[in-house]
């Protein structure tokens, strides 16, 4: 019993250290549903281990009604765990939460299978899981990792990395040997690379390189220099289409008339018709 009270004291001190809104242990004891959920779980987990399964489940259900946090009595919760704001957090039966973990509202540590074995995630020490994040399946989130808000984790997360997105992907890694301050919601406020923007930048760089290569090959072709590479093997160099914008109807008509008259003058039949017209005209005057 004394050990349980010592852990509860540690939990309150952890909340004071990570939440600037907390001013005293008494305030934490009276006003923090996350602390209430953890304290109740300490008791229900002890009952679960002693074989009082129904009693443990009933007490955890009552705690869920009052705190908005659902923690299965079979889950293993480490020391100094902080559930901030608490509402909507779900922790499954076989989940394991390490020491100094921080969970925000709406987090789910859920299972994706129906077998009786390990089916919920394991969080290493110092993990921070942002609001609304879902960690599904028996995967391990490594020590010191961060899961961004609303991320959906469907695979292993290496230690010390930050993952975001659906499905969650790594966007940055914590430098080795550097201790960082507590990061609220699992994400730094600046210098966070966007994986979508990074992908678009890579595509733009590839397109620019290809355009430069095409222009080089076209200049070599125009200057009579031998082409090399795949284009030379194909035996031809494709030219880029020339797009002319804002052509008016009058320009099109003039171009069509010019092409028609030019083709008539250039053809043999057009030349004979012109001679016949001139002869007929000259004969009429004579």
Image (cartoon, grey):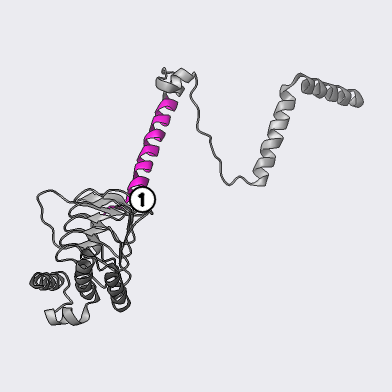
Asked if the stretch drawn in magenta spans residue 136, the answer is no
Secondary structure mostly seen in the magenta stretch? helix
Q: How many marks?
A: 1
Q: Is residue 256 left or right of residue 222?
A: right
Most foreground residue, 235 or 278:
235
Where residue 84 appears, x then y in whole percent? 23, 70
Q: Is residue 34 above or below residue 281?
A: below
Q: Would residue 138 be visible to someone looking at this image?
A: yes
Which residue does the image show at 83% across and 24% down from the upper left? 278
Most foreground residue, 175 or 225:
175
Where residue 48 appears, x then y in whole percent? 24, 66
Which residue does the image show at 39% across and 28% down from the upper left? 216
Q: Would residue 189 be visible to someone looking at this image?
A: no
Most foreground residue, 224 or 170:
170
Question: Which quarter of the picture shows residue 3?
Answer: bottom left
Question: Which quarter of the picture shows residue 105?
Answer: bottom left
The residue that mark 1 highlights is: 196
Question: Which quarter of the picture shows residue 104?
Answer: bottom left
Q: Please, what secondary structure does the residue beneath circle 1 have? A: helix
The quadrant in which the C terminus is found is top right
The quadrant in which the N terminus is found is bottom left
Q: Is residue 128 above or below residue 275?
A: below
Q: Residues within 10 Å of mark 1 (few under 14, many from 20)?
A: few
Q: Which residues are magenta?
A: 192-219
Asked if the stretch drawn in magenta spans residue 193, the answer is yes
């Amino acid at each position: 019993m004394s050990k349980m009270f010592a852990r509860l004291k540690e939990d309150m001190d952890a909340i004071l250290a990570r939440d600037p809104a907390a001013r005293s242990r008494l305030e934490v004891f009276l006003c923090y549903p996350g602390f209430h959920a953890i304290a109740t779980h300490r008791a229900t987990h002890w009952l679960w281990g002693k074989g009082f399964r129904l009693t443990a489940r009933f007490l955890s259900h009552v705690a869920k009604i009052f705190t908005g946090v659902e923690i299965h009595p079979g889950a293993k919760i480490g020391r100094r765990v902080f559930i901030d704001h608490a509402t909507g957090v779900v922790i499954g039966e076989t989940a394991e939460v390490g020491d100094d973990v921080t969970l925000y509202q709406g987090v789910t540590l859920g299972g994706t299978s129906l077998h009786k074995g390990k089916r919920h995630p394991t969080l290493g020490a110092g993990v921070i899981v942002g609001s609304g994040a879902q960690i599904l399946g028996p995967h391990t989130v490594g020590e010191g990792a961060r899961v961004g808000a609303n991320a959906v984790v469907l695979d292993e997360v290496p230690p010390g990395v930050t993952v975001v997105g659906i499905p969650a992907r790594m966007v940055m890694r914590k430098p080795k040997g550097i201790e960082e301050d507590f990061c609220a919601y699992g994400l730094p406020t600046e210098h966070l690379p966007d994986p979508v923007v990074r992908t678009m930048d890579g595509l733009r760089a590839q397109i620019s390189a290809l355009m430069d290569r095409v222009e080089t090959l076209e200049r070599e072709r125009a200057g009579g220099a031998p082409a090399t590479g795949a284009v030379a093997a194909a035996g031809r160099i494709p030219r880029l289409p020339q797009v002319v914008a804002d052509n008016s109807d009058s320009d099109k008509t003039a171009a069509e008339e010019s092409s028609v008259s030019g083709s008539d003058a250039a053809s043999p039949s057009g030349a004979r018709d012109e001679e016949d017209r001139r002869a007929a005209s000259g004969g009429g005057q004579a």
